[in-house]
Image (spheres, grey):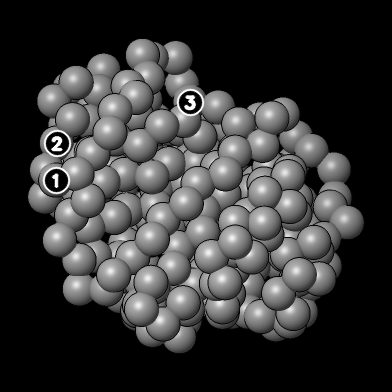
Amino acid sequence: MCTPSPGKLFDARFARPQAFVNLHVEVTADRRFGTNSYLVMDEDTHDAVVIDSNLEPELVIDAAGARAAKVKAILLTHTDLDHIAGLHELREAFGSIPIAVHESERAVVSEGKPLRREFGPLATQIDNVATLREGEPYRAGSLEFEVLHTPGHSPGGVTLKIDGYLFTGDALFAGSIGRSDFANSDGRKLIDGIRSQLLSQPDEMIVYSGHGPATTIGRERTINPFLT
């Protein structure tokens, strides 16, 4: 679980970047942790994925239904409880679609092993688990994501890039960065990954985080107190 490290959050509306796919992005946030779960859909084919599964999965299920989305996969930026809590409900709604996660955290989903030694084992044990690997695109119907390994908050943290969007999980937030005070966190790796993988992206890239509002790479490069 993660809330942004202390720092001012910036809430703004951003122009949609020019995209190769006609994308619709819809965010839902649960009330307990403010964890974001995203519906990402190709508006031409209606192929879609859900990115992260918060404590109120019915919100993204309803969003998918309202858009007549054909959800092809569930992609996880990492496996803290607040990002996987609704997986069983999503499976009930969308069928036995793949759940894709970095290899370092695969056992959290497939075997119920705890991600953090600070917390107990999980009840989550799910089949049809796919692997997200850096350098290998992940395809779900007409959607294709680039996988960027951004560890530090957790060992298998990833950022998912598609067209002009970055889904950064709990690595980078608007005006802040993820926690690195867990036993298996690494603050240096977190900063290094943000600098090498994310701040190397164009300024206009829109960042959708695990918590809080959207931002851009240019804004974070300029004003994020943890990065300036």
Residue named by callout 1: 204
Residue named by callout 3: 4
Quarter occupied by residue 144:
bottom left
Task: Say which mark, if any, is on residue 218.
Answer: 2
Dot 3 amino acid type = Pro
Question: Gap between marks 2 and 3, in whole Å?
Answer: 19 Å
Question: Mark 3 or mark 1: which comes first in sequence?
Answer: 3
Quarter occupied by residue 217:
top left
- Label 1 sits on a secondary structure element that is loop
Dot 2 amino acid type = Gly
Which residue appears at 39% of the width and 73% of the height?
42
User: Where does the C terminus fall, quadrant-wise?
Assistant: top left
Which residue appears at 68% of the width and 59% of the height?
61
Quarter occupied by residue 89:
bottom right
**Residue 154 appears in the picture as rendered:** no
Question: Gap between marks 2 and 1, in whole Å?
Answer: 6 Å
